[in-house]
Amino acid sequence: MRYKPAYTRYEKMKYNRCGRSGLMLPAVALGLWHNFGGVDKFEISRVMVCRAFDLGITHFDLANNYGLPAGSAEYNFGKILKLDLAKHRDEMIISTKAGYLMWPGPYGEWGSRKHLLASIDQSLKRLGLDYVDIFYSHRFDLNTPLDETMSALDTAVKQGKALYTGISNYGPDQTIEAAKILRQLGSSCRVHQPNYSMLDRWVEKDLLDILEKEGIGCICFSPLAQGLLTDKYLKGIPRNSRAAKPYGFLKREQVTEQVLKKIGALNTIAHKRGQTLAQMAIAWVLQDKRITTVLIGASRVEQVEQNISALNNLQFIAEELEQIEKILNND
Ligand SMILES: NC(=O)c1ccc[n+]([C@@H]2O[C@H](COP(=O)([O-])OP(=O)(O)OC[C@H]3O[C@@H](n4cnc5c(N)ncnc54)[C@H](OP(=O)(O)O)[C@@H]3O)[C@@H](O)[C@H]2O)c1
C-alpha cells in the first residue's frame, strides 16, 4: 500500500483550543491502547491510523505500556509513521505517558524521576521520534513527592523530548497541586486526560471547573465506555468484541442486564436523533465546552469513520438531555 493523505483532510474536523494554550486539538482523537499491538493485525492498525488522518484527526495518543506486549503499540505506530506519515510529522500531535508497569524492578512504574525520564527515552526509541508533543504522568503516585514527578515532566520539556506536559487520572486536589508546582518551575500543565462518558461522570463534580479555572485542556478517554455505549452488546457479546477477548480490559461481567437496559433506552434516543448510539455518546461528551477532545478507540476502520461523523450533530435539545439524564439516573 502506498498512502497519500487526502487533500480534504482539514475540511470537516473541528479543532478546539487546549485550555489557555496555543495548541489546537481535534474534537475527536484516536487512542492506540487496544488494537494496535503485537497481537493485532498490523495492516488493520495501519489503515485505521491513515484513515483517521484523512478525516482530520491530527492527535494520536499512546503510552509506554500500550499494546500487547507492552510497548508494541508505540513500536507499530513508529512503523506507520515511517511508512506513511513521515512527511507529515509537523501536522501531528503525538502523546505518550509513563506511570503504569512497563519493566521489572522498582523503576519500571509509578512517578519517580528515574521512571519517567528512562521511560520517555524508551518511548522515543520505539516511536522513532526525536520528541513527542505531549508527555503525561499516567497516574498519581502517593509515595513519590509530586514535585519530583512534575519536575521530571518539566525536564523532559527542557531537554526537548516533549513540547507539552500532561497529567492523567489525577483527582481534583492533585490537579491543583500539580498545576501549581509546574507554574513554580516556569512551566505549565497543559492537559488533563481523565475518563469521561455517560456511564462514568466523576469529572463533573469538581474536576472540569478546576481545569477551566487553571486553563488546562481536557482530553476525555473511553467516551464509549470501551464499547458499551454502542449497539454492539444489545444482542449478546460478539465473538471479536473487546468484552470477548481474553486480554481486553472490558470484562464480560461488566455487560450486565442493568447496563444493557440503559443502553437499549439510549439507543432509541440516538436513532430518533438520526445517529448511532456511539455517535450520540461522543456528541454528549463534547457538548460541554470545557472538553477539548474525546479520545476514541477503534478495532476497525468503519468505527473510526462512524465515530468521527458524530460531529455532524453535536446539538441536543433540552428534552433529549432530560430523557438521557433520566435513563442514566435510573438504577
Ligand atoms: N489515560 C488513561 O489511563 C487511559 C485509559 C484508557 C484509555 N485511554 C486512552 O483512550 C483511548 C480510547 O479508549 P477506549 O478504547 O477505551 O475508548 P472507547 O472509544 O470508549 O472504546 C473503544 C472500543 O469501542 C468499540 N467501538 C468503537 N467504536 C465503535 C462503534 N462505532 N460501534 C461499535 N463498537 C465500537 C471498539 O471495541 P471492539 O474491540 O469491541 O470493536 C473500540 O476498540 C485509548 O486508546 C487510550 O489512548 C487512556
Image: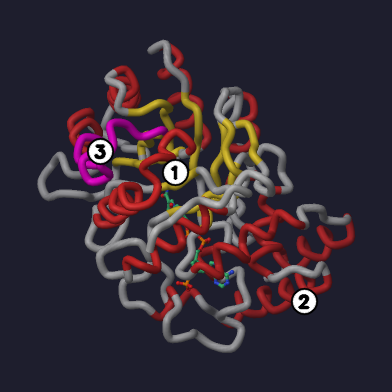
Q: Which mark is residue 268?
A: 2
Tell me the kind of residue under disc 1: Asn
Secondary structure of the residue carrying numbered label 2: helix
Q: Which mark is residue 124?
A: 3
Asked if residue 191 is among those painted magenta in the image, a careful observer would answer no
* C-alpha separation, residue under disc 1 versus residue under disc 3: 23 Å
> What residue would you read off at disc 1?
169
Check the picture and name the quadrant holding the N terminus.
Answer: bottom left
For label 1, the crowd category at 10 Å Cα-Cα, with few meaning under 14, some 14 to 19 and many 20 or more, is some
Please say which color scheme the image uses.
secondary structure
Check the picture and name the quadrant holding the C terminus.
Answer: bottom right
- Magenta stretch bounds: 120-133
For label 3, the crowd category at 10 Å Cα-Cα, with few meaning under 14, some 14 to 19 and many 20 or more, is many
Beta carbon of the mark 1 residue lies under 8 A of ligand 1: yes
Tell me the kind of residue under disc 2: Thr
Left or right of 327, for residue 146: left
